[in-house]
Amino acid sequence: MDVSRAEYFTNRELSWLDFNYRVLGEARDKNIPLFERLKFLSITSSNLDEFFMIRVASLKDMVNAKYEKPDIAGMTPQMQLEAISKKTHDLVNTQYTTYNRSLKPMLRQNGLTIIDSYEDLSESQRNYVDQYFQQDVYPVLTPMAVDSSRPFPLIRNKSLNIGALISDKEDESEYDFATVQVPSVLPRFIEIPSGEKGHKTLILLEQVIEMNIQKLFLNYKVICAYPYRIMRNADLSIDEEDAADLLKEIQKQLKRRQWGEVIRLEVEDGIDKRLLKILKKAMNVGEASIYRINGPLDLTFLMKVNGLDGYDHLKYPKYEPQLSKDINPDEDLFTQIRAKDILLFHPFQSFDTVVDFVRQAAKDPDVLAIKQTLYRVSGNSPIIASLAEAAENGKQVTVLVELKARFDEENNIIWAKKLEKAGCHVIYGLVGLKTHSKITLVVRQEEDGIRRYVHLGTGNYNDSTAKMYTDMGLLTCAKPIGEDATAVFNMLSGYSEPLAWNKLSLAPLWLRDRFVELIHQEEMNAREGRPAHIIAKMNSLCDKGIIMALYKASAAGVKIELIIRGICCLKTGIPGISENITVKSIVGNFLEHSRIFYFYNNGWENVFMGSADWMPRNLDRRVEIMFPVEDETCKKEVMHILDIQLQDNVKAHYLQPDDTYQKPDKRGKTLVSSQDYFCREAIEASAEDKKKDEELSRVFEPMYHNDNEKF
């Protein structure tokens, strides 16, 4: 059976765009609170920015290099770019239809107006805006004219700008081009007097500048002025083998991001053709790379609108992560880990436990060493502070800071230098690989000798995103895992490569084979007439080898249930090949981020968690860790989590044989939203008194469904 044919696979980039459509679907869902819909529309915009800067940029590089090898779906880079262009133009049109026809009118009905144009302002509001411009905006602006003595200026990546045609003559056939950057140091929108009690009115900064642009070009006539925005190639190209100092090389490359090739030009719909012609030539972009926008450029400002005070009734009730029922805050954490493995489920359970694990280790006089990998951390990370304190307290602290974490390079460089100054041993990643694994090792001197405590996770050591991403973590002092953890850090810091592992499976050398082996074992069990079952939850699935192994297992009769948030290059419903595979994507208030893998194994059930998706980059070009969940109580908890997610019929979308995603038919069925369920469950588990019960009622009474409600 040939399972490698191109028609059995979906293109990765088009699958990602389908995911962004699912996010956009949340912005279009009238069952969702209005301000939450704004948030989802903002997310689709920021997602698209990154997609262009990295994925589209990479494809353009391939086309420029005349690379014509097709992907697993049989599409060449040029074919992919053409398909992406069509789909993204449709997506952007749907974004702005949603904004203009649905969200803005509903905002106005609920006491918030976003001004469309200068004509919508009253005289008093115009005076207010003009005064604001003169006092707060004008001093910050730097208009840049272009003529024979002043070349076209550098337009920064992702910056919002206003282009203008200006003339010092009555005859408009002679004109010059000028541009002014909308300053990012000022708020994107300004609240202006509404004149109506209980009503707020907002105007965007670029509109304020447009209204007053004549003041920037005294003695000239401004023929026209329109906003525009560009996206540049931001995919860093680093020759690590020849880089004498990786830190300096990355710092140098970060500056080059601002000079990358322009891959998208956004302009306001109706822009003057003469102005657009100048921009096209200066940016060297073709028609397919131009996006004419019917509304404000860069909708990410809606995330800030979502944060406005006074509209809590139009948002989901704020959820506060609960302390795990397995944690006693009054008891030493190391004592609790010695008693049993502790499973953590964020953000439903608080990430503070992980922060406290590092903090206690830093202060504990019996702790000899702390070792940790850091991929992305928050801007004011308590974990970084604890690691620095541990080093200052004389402990051996080793930290691998991955400098190549995309868009966090600059942040990670700052932290790496701070840790070095505190006396930590800092490793700047590995040549040719990204270290994406999430592991912390604490070595402690105890009465019966040295004991190793380990935290393994599916998400980053970032206390901020831990409130928004669903991730899993395991705290253990099991000796086999402790030995493996030591081997991991010896491998990262030196040239040690273990001959065998006790429990952990690592990429890039061992993890792929382990996954294929586990899938193949289910296939063999099915062929021999035994029950066989695979459940896998991850962010993305696009590895051809893994997909082919799943196809063979499905053809043999293995029941395969996949929960994949984003990219999925596997197709369902292929006769004789993938009829036993279901794929669901859950898009909810929290970003699904955990990676969990279940294999029935002829009744000897295996449960694993880890940092890796089923993607070539994770399995072949990154340091990743998969770890088993062997404690029976923890294993039951993980299976319970998978079971509830498989029941989700509110936030779930199912992949259809025609490559579309559809929400399930809910008629007559009990509604289950897995994220709401886990919030409620966490509150119930940690309820200690009537106050907690009252909080439970307050948080979930306003929700638009519950487990017993019928559609």
Image (cartoon, rainbow, N blue to C red):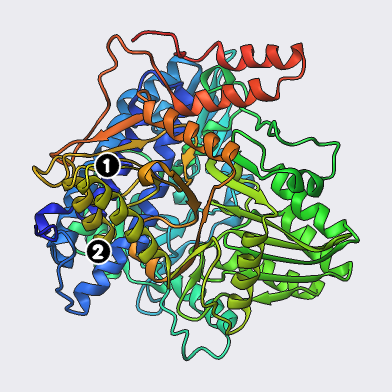
Out of 209 and 601, give the one closest to the viewer. Answer: 601
- Helix, strand or loop for disc 1: loop
Q: Amino acid at mark 2?
A: Lys
> Is there CB contact under 8 Å for labels 1 and 2?
no
Gap in Å between the C-alphas at discs 1 and 2? Answer: 63 Å
Out of 86 and 172, give the one closest to the viewer. Answer: 86
Image quarter where the C terminus lies is top left
- Please provide percent x and percent y for residue 81: 19, 60
Above or below, 535 relative to 119? below
- Please provide percent x and percent y for residue 11: 20, 55
Image quarter for residue 388? bottom right
- Please provide percent x and percent y for residue 490: 63, 77
Residue 2 seen in render: yes
Image quarter for residue 318? top right
- Helix, strand or loop for disc 2: helix
Out of 607 and 692, give the one closest to the viewer. Answer: 607
Q: Residue at x 26, y 43 (%)?
A: 18
Q: Which residue is mark 2?
A: 280
Q: Earlier in the sequence, mark 1 or mark 2?
A: 2
Crowd rating for badge 1 (residues with CA inside 10 Å; few <14, some 14–19, many 20+): some
Image quarter for residue 432? bottom left
Q: Which residue is mark 1?
A: 530
